[in-house]
Amino acid sequence: MVKNFFKNFSDYFVSDVAMDLGTANTLVYVKNQGIVLNEPSVVAVSNNNGHGYGEPVAVGLEAKQMYGRTHSKLKTIRPMKDGVIADFEITNTMIKYFIQKILKNYRFIKPRMVVGIPTCITQVEKKAVIDAATMAGVREVHLVEEPMAAAIGVGIPVHKAEGNMVVDIGGGTTDVAVTSLSAIAYGESIRVAGDELDESILRYMRLQHHLNIGIFEAERVKIQIGSAYPVQPALTTEVRGLNVKTGIPTSIVINDEEIREAMKEPISAIITVLMRALEKTPPELSADIYSNGIYLTGGGALIRGLDKLIEEATNLKTFIPDEPLLTIVKGAGTILDNFDTMRKVCIN
């Protein structure tokens, strides 16, 4: 009876959280509530004349809207780069803000947190994630590799002695992993993903059209007309920026074929790491993958025709879940909801 009373008391004052701390977006799942937050990983802070940062002015969507539009006394920062913490202080501020936003009473009993991380990060980078969450007011932090979380989010029975391949293309990293028996039997990661695709569009516009555009304008173009395979009907969009020859703001109309050419190199790098992972997978697991196919998750899964390009390269069926952007946070949330039985999928 005392145990049940304490549990009810704890549930009333605190809810454990699962977080997909992404390069582009941060998503948060609260136990017994579901996904409650999905905002850009951007923070706007006051700039103290080069003497460090002041208080945060805006976090998330509001800060993203300020990006590239600030004055000398205000700076917008993306504290995550290539899937890891690039600015510890600002990341800590961002995590703390999001936790306070969703858990009004978390100060009474600190929450437990499950966080998704790329497979390629170092022990130092893992410690930075744990330290940032702890300093933000979390009592204990458990890390899960993003492709494992994505596999669980898709609904793959990761506990079985059966190989399943997940390709998670996020903002900063692309993770390729084969899961079996609640662990990653083989995994590989490259720091080529959504951000690199945006950068490739930015470079293409500057070189081919002498047009300087912002990184979020490049992201918008990618989302609206980006493709890895020819599409019908053809897609076009207007792109606005600064003409580097005249120094005058202008706009041009471009089509999906140009953007496909712009993204060709990073997409080829993703296909290469996928093929390498297939070559290094043990035969028994390879047989399972032949039967089960490949699961494509993350924001990169939304690039038109990427699944078809992968199928052509591998001769394997490629599946995209209904909401590929949410698979990691859904998987981390499932671990949180069933923590006693699924704790072993987390890493030390």
Image (tube, grey):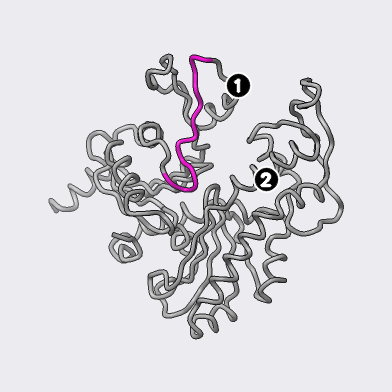
| Residue 129, x across and y down, in percent | 35, 45
Read off the residue under disc 1.
Answer: 69
Residue 332 in the image: above or below residue 152: above
Q: Is residue 334 left or right of residue 23?
A: left
Indicate left or right for 87 with 223 as reference. Answer: left
Dots 1, 2 in contact, CB < 8 A: no
**Residue 209 counted in the magenta span:** no
Around disc 2, counting alpha carbons within 10 Å, would you say few (fewer than 14), some (14 to 19), or many (20 or more)?
many
Indicate the quadrant where residue 346 lies: bottom left
Q: Earlier in the sequence, mark 1 or mark 2?
A: 1
Q: Position of residue 35 (x, y in %)?
A: 47, 46
Image quadrant in which the C terminus is located: bottom left
- Residue furthest out toward the left: 2
Q: Secondary structure at mark 1?
A: loop
Nearest the camera: 200 or 166? 200
Label 2 sits on what residue type?
A: Ser
Q: Where residue 200 is drawn, which disc sits there?
A: 2
| Residue displayed at 60% across by 74% down | 293
Residue segment shown in magenta? 72-84
> Residue 109 at what x, y percent from top left?
23, 39
Q: Residue 83: where, in percent of width, then height?
A: 47, 48
Instruction: For residue 12, say whether it is visible.
Output: no
In the picture, measured across the screen, residue 298 lies left or right of residue 303, that is left
Secondary structure category for the residue under label 2: helix
Q: Residues within 10 Å of mark 1 (few under 14, many from 20)?
A: few
Whether residue 79 appears in magenta in the rendering, the answer is yes
